[in-house]
Image: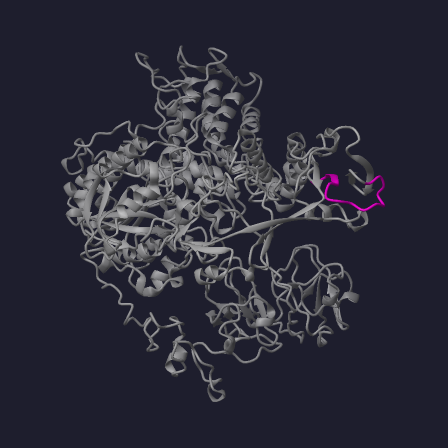
Amino acid sequence: PDADSAGQRNVRKYLRDNTINYFRVLWENEDALPADAAACDILQSCYSVVDGCVCDTTTTESVAFITVQSIVSKSNLLGTLHVGAFDPTLFDVGVYTSLGECVLGIQVYSKTSSSCAHPLDLEAIFQVTDEYGVVRFLKNSILTVHVSSTTASFRNPVHFIDFANRNLRDMFQETDAVLASYFYHPSHAPFMALRLLQRFGLSNPSPTYIARVSTAYTLGQYGEFGSGTYGDLSATIAAILLDDESRQVVLDADLSHGHLREPLLKIFGLLRSMEAGLWAPLSVTPFVDRSINWSVGQSPYRVPSVFSFFKPEFTTGNLNDLGLVAPEAEVLKGGLIISLLDGIWSTMKFGLTQCHGGFKSRGWGIECPRQEGAAMIDATATLQYEADSTSNLDEILDELVLILTAGRLSHSNRLIVRNAMQSTFQSGDRAKAVRIAVQLIAASPEFHSTNVARKTGLPTPISGYENAPPEPYKAVVYYYMAGGVDSFNVLVPRANCKNGRNVYQEYQNARGSVSLSTSKLLDIDATGSNQVCDTFAVNENYVDIQNMYNAGDALFVANAGVLNKPLTKHDDYKRQSKVQLFAHNTMQTENYKCDINDEMGGTGVGGRILDMLRRQGYHTSANMVDAGSLMLKGSSSDNNPVWTVPLNDPSELDRYSSVGPNMLDLVKNLNGASSVDDGLLGQTWSLMTSKALFEYEKSLEYAELFDSPEFDMSHWPASLDRLKNRFRALAQFIKMRNVRKVNREFFVIKHDGFDSHSESQQEVNALFKESNDVLKKFVDEMKLQGIWNNVVIVMGSDFGRSISPNSNGGTDHAWGGNYFMLGGSIKGKQILGQYPEYLSSQSNQWISRGRIIPTTPWEYVWHGVAQWMGVLENNDLRSALPNMDNFRKCDMYTDGQLFVDGQVSPYDCENMDTDGDGIPDDLDLCPNTMSIYVQHGLVDDSGCSLSFPPSMSSSPTPVTADPTVEPTGVPTNTNINLQDVGDNGSPPELYPLGNCQGDCDNNGECKGNLVCFQRGGTEAVPGCEGQGISRKDYCFNNGNLLWSVGSNGSPANSYPLGACQGACVSDAECIPGLKCFERSGIEEVPGCVGTGNSGMNYCYVVDGTSAPTSQNPTQGPTTANPTGSPTTRAPTTSPTKDPSQAPTN
């Protein structure tokens, strides 16, 4: 504000040098800003502070458009003006004059002008309707902030709140502006379209379908539906329901079309189809009770988080391999599938009750029926469907198939159902025959998905290990505190700090209202850990963690988190982190994957570690305790299934069965082995159901052993407390390890509730006490079983929380955090990693709102854990941890650092030489120099490779600049292993690349006529062996492979086409001498390899002629992801007709 009569301003008490208020700035002349504190202090109007430079600023205002004629278009005006104005009609009459629509779509108002031909001043106001249909009033003004003593400047940021005179009106206006920025963001409409399409039955809608729905949302109009207003949901829903992609029956042939149905929708759909009659109209208590959530994974008003019951990007199995999602599959866990089926069967036999696995919560004093089909008198609902008395068996089955699966039941599954109900129907018991049919149909993939299923009629083979494995047994338990644990109140600096600093006081100053007093802390000795203090403390509620630490059974890892590479606040950390920071779903996913570049798509770190162990002959098992399937997923080729640990002792399934003892066998057949054209979503249900039934039958076998002294768990009885019950189930499952014949296991167990935005410290500390108590109970049980030395517990969370408290008295999403590891073999009583030296902006890791960038990536921890489990080879470790090469190997924790029985000593960075080039890693600028350069002594003093002398360029070596002869017109079948030579054109001496070498970005980075084969994963590269690195692109000999270059003569520089290139319409679009081979499907094109695009025509060489040289020698076939760079046409000499000499597609 302006100064008062005494020259004073009222801002100082609100703004200080350390006031944090971040906003994005688009600088002009950014280079003119001071680069460091010294440069800052030289400037007359600036002075340096701890973490920046404080400078005076001035603001100037200038006219944006001097005349109407200088306005190019509406978009030009909207892109230039950013200062709002009041509606001119709100002013007194005569203050503003309307000049009319001086430019198409732009109404102009002026205080001084009366014609569009007159000049405009600062007071002019423009009225314009933007692309979202919002009427906006904009002032003809450009406000510029100038940094004094420099030439740097920026346009004014949008800001409503007056720091000196804050008021509620400004708060509302700023909130409205934030919400509007979200609502009108370009990504909002397609995001809404995708999410709504997923909820309306398409898990994987096509991009064009999303675009059409997004357009309807933006325009507010779809045919006759909608008001024409942005965000009109009636237009959006009309676009979803009336689009061809939602209604065409032919799309049932698409194996990925449709979705898995949500549990509650399946139950309500069944009740509606079976004409359920409620005993009272509003009696829906079974579905609002907590118990339904426990039994099927979903219930009204019981959403576990803001992300609902399942994440929209969840994927599994074959769907993951194909880049598809199945959100609802996240609740398809073994126990939930079993209880869902049992509930459906019970409802069909007895009505909606609490009896025999029914969905209703258990009542008291009610006797359950003991005969199939005997509906209970007090059932909440009875099923009143009756088949037409004149209908024969097939007519009844037709109707049931129609109302339960929309007619999708496959022929093989229909036959299973028909055979099961036939004898009962023929005996005259039509009602029971209907119950049998409905129960079986309701177990089929066609009921649980909207796919068309095609089954062989044979059960899916699933089995466990047959022979006992060798000792020792080892297990990793990943204890996941979901929501983002406030771990800076788990581990706190206390005393004996560097340079006599009182770091605990600094902690209190930084954390404010959420800091812990010394009376709430328990000291631990960190001497020798090279931390900022020698004395730390743990939260008072972690008394048993303190005891384990002091006993050497616990260690801490400080400031750990998801990282792509080492980062500080001076880096472009948001872009270089390669992940959407601070969001629960993305950070949880990255914690589970530990593969931030998605090189091993859809797999988790636990699953990949188990894959490496399984290849060595270990008997592995990946087990989720109610959560964490992604972390446990391995490669599909290694066949490491993810098992569900049963939380309760198994109860009898399908009591008083309608079908009889072969019920489960029939369900296995309904969900049996897939035909090649089986729908992928239904296939997902079938695979998970087959596995759930296998687990159920195994649990029955195990339950028979629980009464024996060896497996007795009576000292730890089952509990209604979900967390205690999860750990009890985990302990019991481990106890059965010899029966299950496993010797390497990975478990994920989740503890909910740590997203403490507004929770009091009392609530957070209560969670810590709950955590401490259940861990103590579990550790005692492991000791009782005699395997505490064989188990390690690794604590994790989405992220750490902000150092600074928020205005609600809680903390917000952050990044780095502090975590413990527990185990009898842990090399305890140490703090690894680097606890932040300063809990303030003095730290290089401190970013906005008190967030800390991690200094310890999770790769460090899992590296040592993997070694302890038995993964010791570097290549295996890289497969388990695909991002580990982005960090110094010598910084990785070894099992010798983490465990007393570790085999690998801690790495010595000063003397470690990973690539063997004679340059220690800590001095080596290229620590992964290829062995060929090391062998020939072609390494400079920095550890980087030199160019090969000409005399050596053709030497036979594992990797050279060109390991193959120049490609010819006739490709051979001598395949070469894929070789990773460089990246982004570096090192330059290896570019252009030879055959089967990568990474290339375009054809220009490949030698001669080689083409860059661009990949989305590990697709086979024609003529090359191996998978290479996921998503890396490799040069290859295109030869006579069918390529799609253009369409309808576009792009023009691709035509005429060479041999095996498409699409052509006539011979005239082919190089003279070639002909256009017309196809209706994927017919073989003479002399060419591959199927190409179905229905696309390709040019080919007519027998007995030679293909002429391309008339466009610099233009070649584009790859799947064209880069826009000039490409090279593949050779067009006549390709061989010998299929043994042609590369495969």
> Horizontal placement of 169 versus 858: left or right?
right
- Residue for point 40% across, 35% down: 757
Please indicate, yes or no, whether residue 550 appears anywhere in the rendered image. Answer: yes
As displayed, is residue 363 above or below residue 68? above
> Horizontal placement of 875 versus 420: left or right?
left
Q: Position of residue 704 (x, y in %)?
A: 22, 34
Q: Position of residue 1028 (x, y in %)?
A: 46, 65
User: Magenta stretch containing residue 126, yes or no?
Assistant: yes
Please indicate, yes or no, whether residue 793 appears anywhere in the rendered image. Answer: no
As displayed, is residue 893 above or below residue 754? below
Which residue is more in the foreground, 191 or 810? Answer: 810
Quadrant of image for the C terminus: bottom right
| Magenta region, main secondary structure | loop
Which residue is more in the foreground, 164 or 167? Answer: 164
> Horizontal placement of 9 versus 932: left or right?
right
Magenta stretch: give its range: 113-131
